[in-house]
Amino acid sequence: MTSVAKKQANIASFQAFFNAYIKEIDSGVWHTKEDWVIRTGIQLQPNDNYAVELYLTSTNTRLSISASYRSTVGRHAFTAVFKQLPNSFQWEEVSLMNAILLLIDEIYSGSKESHEPNDAVDEQSLELYARTIESHQIMALYLENRAGDPDLASNKFIDSEQAILFGHWLHPTPKSRQGMHRWQHELFTPELKGQFRLHYFAAKQDITLSNSAESISAFEILEEIVLSDGKDSTKTLIEKLRKDNLKLLALHPLQADWLCAKPHIQDLINKGELIQLGELGPLFTPTSSVRTLYNAELNYMVKLSIPVKVTNSLRKNMHHELEAGVTLCRLLQRCGFSRLYPKFKFIDDPAYISLNAGASKESGFELILRKNPFNSKNEITGLGGTQSIAALVQEPLAPGTYSRLAKIIQMLAQKEGEECADVALTWFDNYLDCAIEPAIRLFDQCGIALEAHQQNSLLDLSEGYPTAYYYRDNQGFYLSKERQQILETMEPRLAQCDDLFYGEQMIINRFTYYLFFNQLFAVINRLGADQLVQEGTLLQKVYTRLNSILPTLGSLGTAFVTSVLGREKLPFKANLLTRVEDVDELEAEDELAVYVWVTNPFKSVAVRSDTPSLVCKQASELEEVIADAC
């Protein structure tokens, strides 16, 4: 492994872990560069402006973490770590990965103070060590293999999906892929541009499940996908299956290997109820989620279960999500929101296929068919293509270069003969128009909130400026119980999807995290870190925009906006604490991870502004009620 790739992985891994640590566990004490030099004698690097001081109680050790950028809303940029041992005046530099291990020790030390054996804590700490080290090693592997690849700068949809080499900047182990062997990464990961065929089975229709909101059945869609390979042998096979009244099922190859080792699946195969056909059809390549697969010539993507833990969860399609995807597709068509707000679009999951598992619900064969608006017939790359916000805001992959977002703004500025700062402000206004305001109005008018985090959120940047927003993910819909009767009248099948409905306070908390902390603040942070516009200026712009739309909102929208602007602290999804407690959020009750409360960045804006009395009054009334929802 090259020293460059290892160094990049060291820095990115520490950034991810320590940003989570100071947000969720111990915020430390911030010092200016000048103050810290006087206090400690530590000479910071020329680009470092701050130092964060931490005290580790388990070892009586002080840490000094140098920072080149301090963010109001999101990700700080850290560069080096020093430690001072007990009864010592000397500070010594610590490697970034060793610093992470020190912090993990500190996290679990409180649980070990009784000195009593605690197998659960030991298991959790070992799990976090393992995922941290694995994430670092995998990230370094990706960086080394993709170094110099021109596709990293491509604006094609799939190239941007496969360029997120550093991973989720709000997750402490962003490239953890437990369950995937090292040699399998080349075949199956987006970062290494894997390509493979699906593994197919055939079964009698009476032991399968399917539904479709399209004009043709899910089985017909899957047959069209298989036949797209153009082979005569495939055509002959499909004709025989039709003649024998057998239906196609498809699995990710990793899932096929895992399931075929299960006794009950072997039993079905031995009885002839499940026929193994092997690898067929066209090649697919993974998008950023690893398990949603893309082919540039097809009208659909496929979303499959895999026996792999990606970040917090084992990635599998849940039984209840299958019908929910079809029902939500119909609901969104009938509610007409996209006709009112044509810049705000949904990537539907309109069909599914599975093997009937009976009482156990999930069979492992759950396949979701997702619309593909970015196939070769429809994709327009233009200046910036269509990219996820996760790709746009990722740290530059090479030192001394620029983020994807900064490059787009620089190109626009050059094209228009304008200052980058002015272009960035215009770009940000367009982004609010496409992505943020419509999401709030969707909740207000329809009672539908979205898990609109940066990976689920895509922007059409073919003109450079955002012209459309796309939302993807049938797992990420929160429907208001207060609007349940109205929504069920609009789409009666929602009566069978009760787990899509949540109380207002629960939705406000989750929606606050996903729309603001995960998505909007990531954009603000990127523009600030790239020195295009100060974060405070952008926060003020959002604050003004939200206050301007407040009089036009109904009860749900008003409750949400006043909560976001008026509360002293806001709910924040604690990915590190979720990992510390080894929670699989998709298996947890209500699929709820661990949340903490953090300082509201808008309060710094409110101090400088004339805060509407409505915001202050309603926020204070909501404060105690909403706090209970986390």
Image (spheres, rainbow, N blue to C red):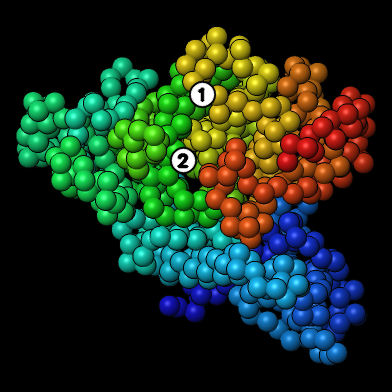
428 or 285, nearer to the observer: 285
User: Where is 134 relative to 233, above or below?
Assistant: below
Q: Residue at x 85, y 35 (%)?
A: 624
* 3D distance between C-alphas at marks 2 and 1: 35 Å
**Which residue is at a point 51% across and 27% down the rendered structure image?**
345
For label 1, count other residues whose C-alpha is less than 10 Å away and answer few (under 14), some (14-19) or many (20+).
Answer: some
Residue 548 appears in the rendering: yes
Regarding residue 339, the answer to whether it shows in the image is no
- Work out which quarter of the rendered image holds the N terminus and state it: bottom left
In the depicted structure, whether residue 76 falls above or below residue 83: above
Which residue is labeled 1 in the image? 497
Quarter of image, res 110: bottom right
Q: Amino acid at mark 2?
A: Gly
User: Residue 385 — which label?
Assistant: 2
Q: Secondary structure at mark 1?
A: loop
Percent position of residue 120, x then y: 61, 64
Q: Are the residues flagged by discs 2 and 1 in contact, CB closer than 8 Å?
A: no
> Residue 82, how many percent across, how many down?
74, 80
> Which of pointers 2 and 1 indicates the residue nearer the eye?
1
- Number of labelled discs? 2
Q: Earlier in the sequence, mark 2 or mark 1?
A: 2
Residue 510 position in % (x across, y down): 67, 37
Amino acid marked by disc 1: Cys
In which quadrant of the rendered image does the C terminus lie? top right
| Residue 277: x %, y % from top left | 15, 44
Depth check, front residue: 66 or 273: 273
